[in-house]
């Protein structure tokens, strides 16, 4: 999620003629009553009946300013920024970059990302928040050029999660530093490996010969929450924290996850040998998991759930199927990787959280394969089971156990012929539980690298704008092996490109255009909130698109309106609501100007609160 988009040129001439914008708009007709919210929204958008009853705000224009802009009738305020104290007596943020690791461990971590709220009462709640990575040019006075052992510990303390209680007074939420649940989870917090891969030889190290105890969670991107009250934090670009000053022979299993000895900008391995590939190569196998956390118990041990597979997790979208099975949709955020689904072995029991907290211990992992109808950007799909002994996952093909399949889930997905995707990021399940959406951010390798050919769900070569795919499981059964899919939207720039897919789908126009959809989530009313993490140069292919932003879409009509623009250099990421839906919490990650304090201040990642001036529900 932190990979900024590469600068690219006009590749419209490379588009297959049958996938022209005109043909796409003609081909996306309704697919039958009850399917995809009755009609294909892009097709309905062609009728220019953009009259959403959900989107009750005035769209704002694109912006290049170093501030947050929201519609008329809305206001913003800051909840917490990197370095703010979360415990009594913790030091306040000091911009000099000289604060030590102990201080950082008592403060809000860096680069806020996915987050969830767990209500305690009408005016009190717990927030669980990811702190994805660190910006050394701001974290240290030496900008990372003279790293000491304590500097490494400080960087590790800025990773992980912040759990903090918030209270509302006079309509406004604030941090309660005396909250009993307040906690920092970092790269050095003790955790347990659970599930089918726990204890496997591939997870054993000198420090942990059992393969079940691991220190820390890192590069925590997006998130999920369970009906039994736990928080799911997802490990993404963990590879960048491993390295070595020695020559190390790394096999394809390391290379597939981008793990290498050179080019390590974080410099953890010289002083923390856990991250030195020459000393502890298997430590890398202990990251790339979904971690389950009890936010209400600050003494609880976080659990790495190996049944959900190891890859660069974006988020974990949880839905309870009608038959009681827990289904979790998972995106692997890298160019040419895959979309996954986990189905629990046992069933959810209402009110029995002791049993429910074991549901992620075991189940079946699947990976998606998409097929396209001729001349239409819609089609069918199947979920292929990733179980040892099935679908070619055998010793003959290099798989020795179920644990190995989960540890090297990417390799297993390739073996079974899964569709390579344009960076699957956040997945969101519509409140009606009938439809699932996933942002596909971009892919400069599409149509260029072997195995990443242009196809229906990924319809553009060297895709630099992104799209949102939507599917409906057969018979509204999330455990089903089949589904139907279409594209909710194709992002683009209709002022730079005309007549082809780089202009975007019909619900994209000069007033709401954007690139690189990333964060995604529904509110209770069914509004689809879309956050971006892309090219903010405002030039060339991206002229007129301005800073990263958040938009709101109506899944039924297809209409999309811009609701928020972020400050200079930032990614807009992370989304949650107060229980009454009257406060929206949005993350502003890696700003590069002077947000939030302005002037000549140091930029700080911040969680922003958005409220409606009349006290109403956001978006209403």
Image (cartoon, rainbow, N blue to C red):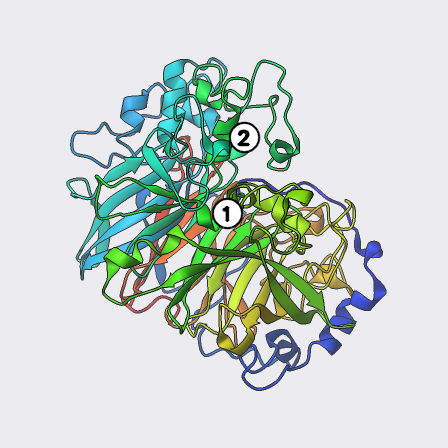
The outermost residue toward the bottom is 33
Q: Which residue is painted at 18% across and 62% down in the image?
A: 122
Which of the numbered marks, if any, corresponds to residue 309? Answer: 1
- Density class for disc 1 (Cα within 10 Å; few <14, some 14-19, many ≥20) is many
Q: Quadrant of residue 468?
A: bottom right
Relative depth, front residue between 597 and 365:
365
Q: Is residue 44 above or below residue 467?
A: below
Which of the numbered marks, if any, corresponds to residue 235? Answer: none
Dividing the image into 4 quarters, which one contains the C terminus? bottom left
Q: Is residue 311 above or below residue 85?
A: below
User: Where does residue 355 sit, x and y in percent of width and height?
Assistant: 27, 58
Is 446 left or right of 554, judged from the image as shown?
right
User: Where does residue 537 sit, x and y in percent of width and height?
Assistant: 62, 43
Q: Is residue 397 above or below residue 285?
A: below
Can residue 519 be seen here? Answer: no
Which of the numbered marks, if any, corresponds to residue 240? Answer: 2
The mark closer to the camera, 1 or 2, is 1
């Amino acid at each position: 999620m932190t990979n900024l988009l590469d600068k690219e040129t006009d590749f419209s001439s490379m588009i297959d003629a049958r996938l022209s914008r005109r043909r796409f708009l003609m081909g996306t007709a309704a697919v039958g009553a009850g399917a995809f919210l009755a009609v294909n929204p892009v097709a309905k958008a062609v009728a220019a009946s953009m009259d959403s009853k959900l989107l009750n705000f005035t769209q704002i224009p694109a912006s290049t300013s170093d501030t947050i802009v929201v519609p008329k009738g809305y206001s913003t305020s800051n909840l917490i920024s990197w370095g703010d104290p979360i415990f009594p007596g913790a030091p306040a943020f000091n911009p000099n970059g000289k604060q030590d690791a102990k201080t950082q461990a008592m403060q809000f971590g860096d680069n806020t990302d996915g987050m969830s709220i767990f209500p305690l009462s009408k005016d009190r709640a717990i927030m669980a928040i990811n702190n994805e990575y660190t910006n050394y040019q701001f974290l240290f006075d030496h900008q990372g050029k003279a790293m000491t052992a304590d500097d490494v510990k400080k960087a590790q303390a800025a990773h992980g999660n912040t759990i903090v209680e918030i209270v509302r007074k006079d309509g406004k939420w604030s941090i309660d530093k005396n909250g009993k649940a307040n906690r920092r989870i970092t790269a050095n917090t003790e955790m347990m490996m659970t599930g089918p891969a726990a204890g496997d030889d591939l997870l054993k190290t000198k420090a942990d010969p059992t393969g079940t105890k691991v220190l820390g969670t890192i590069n925590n991107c997006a998130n999920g929450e369970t009906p039994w009250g736990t928080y799911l934090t997802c490990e993404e670009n963990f590879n960048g924290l491993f390295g070595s000053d020695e020559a190390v022979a790394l096999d394809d299993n390391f290379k597939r996850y981008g793990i290498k000895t050179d080019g390590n900008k974080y410099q953890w391995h010289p002083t923390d040998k856990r991250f030195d590939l020459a000393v502890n190569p298997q430590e890398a196998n202990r990251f790339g998991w979904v971690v389950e956390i009890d936010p209400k118990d600050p003494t609880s041990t976080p659990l790495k759930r190996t049944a959900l597979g190891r890859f660069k997790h974006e988020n974990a979208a949880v839905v309870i199927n009608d038959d009681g099975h827990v289904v979790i949709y998972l995106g692997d955020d890298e160019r040419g990787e895959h979309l996954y689904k986990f189905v629990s072995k046992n069933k959810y029991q209402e009110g029995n959280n002791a049993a429910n907290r074991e549901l992620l211990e075991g189940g079946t992992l699947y990976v998606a394969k998409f097929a396209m109808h001729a001349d239409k950007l819609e089609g069918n799909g199947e979920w292929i089971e990733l179980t040892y002994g099935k679908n070619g996952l055998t010793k003959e093909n290099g798989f020795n156990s179920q644990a190995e399949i989960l540890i090297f889930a990417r390799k297993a997905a390739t073996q079974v012929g899964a569709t390579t995707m344009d960076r699957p990021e956040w997945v969101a399940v519509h409140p009606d539980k009938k439809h699932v959406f996933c942002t596909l951010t971009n892919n400069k390798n599409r149509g260029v690298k072997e195995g990443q050919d242009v196809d229906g769900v990924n319809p553009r070569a060297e895709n630099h704008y992104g799209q949102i795919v939507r599917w409906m499981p057969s018979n509204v059964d999330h455990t089903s092996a089949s589904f139907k899919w279409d594209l909710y939207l194709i992002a683009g720039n209709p002022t730079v490109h005309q007549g082809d897919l780089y202009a975007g789908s019909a619900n994209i126009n000069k007033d709401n255009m954007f690139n690189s959809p990333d964060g995604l989530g529904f509110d209770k009313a069914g509004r689809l909130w879309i956050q971006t993490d892309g090219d903010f140069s405002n030039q060339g292919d991206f002229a007129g698109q301005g800073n990263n932003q958040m938009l709101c879409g109506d899944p039924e009509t297809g209409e999309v309106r811009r609701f928020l623009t972020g400050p200079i250099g930032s990614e807009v990421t992370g989304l949650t609501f107060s229980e009454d839906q009257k406060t929206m919490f949005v993350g502003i990650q890696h700003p590069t100007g002077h947000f939030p304090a302005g002037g000549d201040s140091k930029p700080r990642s911040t969680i922003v609160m958005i409220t409606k001036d009349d006290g109403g529900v956001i978006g209403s």
